[in-house]
Amino acid sequence: MKHKILINKMTLYEKISLLTGANFWTSREIERLGIPSLCFTDGPSGVRKQATKSDHLGLNPGVPATCFPAAAAIANSWDEALVEETGEALGREAAALNVDVVLGPGLNIKRSPLCGRNFEYYSEDPYLSGKMAAAFTRGIQKNGISACLKHFAANNQELRRMTTDSIIDERTLREIYLTGFEIAVKEGKPYCIMSSYNKLNGIYTNEDSRLLRDILRAEWGFEGFIVTDWGGGNDPVQGVIAGCNLEMPSVSHNSNRELLEAVRDHRLDESIIDKSIDELLNVIFNLKNSNYIKTLKNFDINENHNIARKAASESIVLLKNEDNILPLKKGKKIAIIGGFAENPRYQGAGSSIVNPSKLENILDCICEYDLHVTGYEQGFNRQGKKDEARMKNACVLAKKSDLILLFLGMDETLEVEGQDRTDMKLKQNQIELLEALSKINSAIVVILSCGAPVEMQWLDNCKAVVHGYLGGQAGSRAILDILTGKICPSGKLAESYPVVLEDTPCYNYFPGNEKTAEYREGIYTGYRYYDTANIKVQFPFGFGLSYTTFQYSDINAGVSGVSFNVTNTGKVFGAEICQVYIGKKNSNIFRPKKELKGFVKIKLAPLQCENVFVKFDDKAFRYYDIENGEFMTEPGIYEIYVGSSSLDIRLSAAVSIKGENKNKLSNKNILPSYYSGNIKNVQDSEYKTLLNCEIPESKWDRSAPLGINDTLSQMFYPRGWIARLIYKILTGKINNVKKSGKPDMNVLFLLNMPFRSIAKMTNGAFDIHMTEALLYIVNGHFFKGIFKLAVSWNKKRKANRQFAVNLHNYLLEQ
């Protein structure tokens, strides 16, 4: 241990106190030993340091800060240098605000387009996700502060995210859901990682020593500290044993008392606490002793705004450009239709919400461009209500114009932490407006604002589609830069766009509705499924148009990498994202047709040619062998594909790889769905074989009373009438939220949280024993529950007060 001398000076009370938060956003300090606290803040797309009373759910506003493009947007840039620059700018603001740990980036895999938090995540592909997260982490940590990778791991749905059990076979877990974290840890070297809320194969991730100790620390070499997601601690004793260093937020001294009792009962060895504290102190002192952070007093708001604009412009994806309607031609009379032009969707909702330092919109900015604007109409109600008057006014304006810029998107209640989407559709009134306008004027350019794929059966009703995703506070000017040709579009999709929701690989398995989430699709996420099973998509992974064209030639592939030439054959300066995929035909193991294993973004002037070399790393040819419990390389001939998207392959070559011969020949008859890639209807017997264990029970036992890890959303079936009344009130509030168009994170959080969270998210007002007393009431034992609640409250009050006295007086354990 690096801090053995210091730790030996601590009392047991002091040691234990360091393992839990002091309040909602800071860890504890020990002033007498010179151990400072850490200040945390949300921050995947900007610093959310709250200016008034702190809360986790976004109710109270944060101090003004730059709102950068969401992860779902900036991933479309495929530009590690740009992502790192953005992270550095965000980190400067955090350092200037005396923040020590920024809670981001998030890099959970986009298993389904419906996950409500996908806007915070990078991609459906682990390689791209890991590279983006590593770059963002490096940028943040240049400022002498810490990034915090989240949510580790397999946290891919919002529905009952704090209790759901992700059931994943070992190979899928390692190749898809952990690889991004592995890349980010090894290449970004974060000081902090956040464990996720969910269980993983029956164990809460925060209590999974194999995940936190064996894989994260021993295998990947992680040297930072692990923090729970806010309110994500279940059993504090098991958490510390597994490797968690800090439970957040503060639960007063409730968890401290449990840890103290565990030490006295010999269920927790004090040496484990010492090790956990040592890992935490390494980061605390590294951050606090940073010379850089001591000299950083402020940041340039305008400079960071310009970086946000640059990031947004390079992340915008041109999906359609029929008849080269874009860039806009001078002299055209242009109508602006759609409320998103006036009130932009620039970020998702939830804990990541940022109070922007300056927010631009299309109507205010368009006057700076040489365009002839005929007028603006809202066109539709944002929440989906029919509005004939708005539609009529929009159609009148369309008749007076040569071209329509139509701003469509999803409203704020559809992409929000705490709930998943139920479909992939735009609101019907928006589609009806587009159809009506197309009958009047076919020259329509749709500008989309949403953080996830939508179905596009309406695509034939417009000439062009520009997808801005959620582009942050400077996204409007970035869109105008693209529309006018000031900047040539270069973004490419970091996720596939299926034709309809039913085409998605996990359609029959997402979300897990009760106890479990079954990942029956296995390794076939996103393009890995569509390309292998030959499923038609609206737009493939890696797709994006440009105002220029690029030619690929002269491939030369070897075991160490692949080189090729790229030429800008068009008339304007542009950037091309070259993608390298690797596949193996006639494999003894089941595998996707091809997988992304490298990429590079190059910028070329007209007629300029550049030789590109993409180096293969240790992940290029590997697969996870479950029999040997390690990554291995199957020997044989591999196909190297170089393309402009996963379907637009321009060059290919074959490479012979030696590999290892340890793997046994697999029996294709046992796992036929996985060898064919047709995994939409995997039967129990086959899934059981893939898991190599029994399939866990997925349904609630509705005859049993609710327990500490059941959710408030289950209160529709207990015997107690109070539970059903509370459930009715909560669901009523959610319906009102949807109607209002303003997401209420408090309601969403309450409905999906387990009862134990009452003891974790009330700043110590309740402990686990008081929560158990509440369950008596919920389950129909009102008077018994009230009595137990009073007794538990009194015991908790006395015990916490005694612990605080002992801590304050530095008493040694008796």
Image: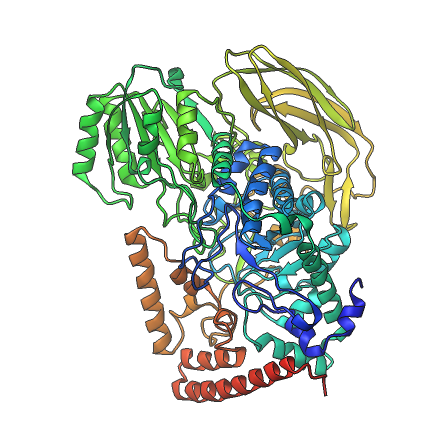
- Examine the rendered structure and indicate whether residue 359 appears above or below residue 481: below
> Can you tell which quarter of the image residue 278 is in?
bottom right
Depth order, front residue of 70/102: 102
Q: Is residue 456 visible?
A: no
User: Percent from the top left, x then y, of residue 175?
Assistant: 67, 44
Give the image location of residue 138, x and y in percent. 65, 43
Q: Position of residue 256 (x, y in %)?
A: 62, 76
Q: Considering the image in quadrants, where does the N terminus appear?
A: bottom right
Residue nearest the viewer, comparing 108 with 534: 108
Image mark count:
0
Along the line of sight, the residue nearer the viewer: 396 or 525: 396
- The vertical placement of 663 against 321, above or below, is below
Is 102 displayed left or right of 226 in the figure?
left
Question: What residue lies at 43% left-to-right and 54% top-to-bottom?
Answer: 419
Quarter of the image that includes the C terminus: bottom right
Q: Residue at x 32, y 35 (%)?
A: 341
**Looking at the image, which is closer to me, 23 or 681?**
23
Q: Along the horizontal axis of the image, is 688 left or right of 366?
A: right
Q: Residue 776 is drawn in which quadrant? A: bottom left
Name the colouring of the figure.
Answer: rainbow
Residue 721 lies left or right of residue 65; in this view the side is left
At horizontal 37% and vertical 74% (from top left) the residue drawn is 723
Q: Is residue 757 above or below residue 743?
A: below
The residue under the point 54% across, 87% down is 798
Q: Position of residue 121 (x, y in %)?
A: 53, 45
Q: Is residue 418 visible?
A: yes
Dividing the picture into quadrants, the one containing residue 533 is top right
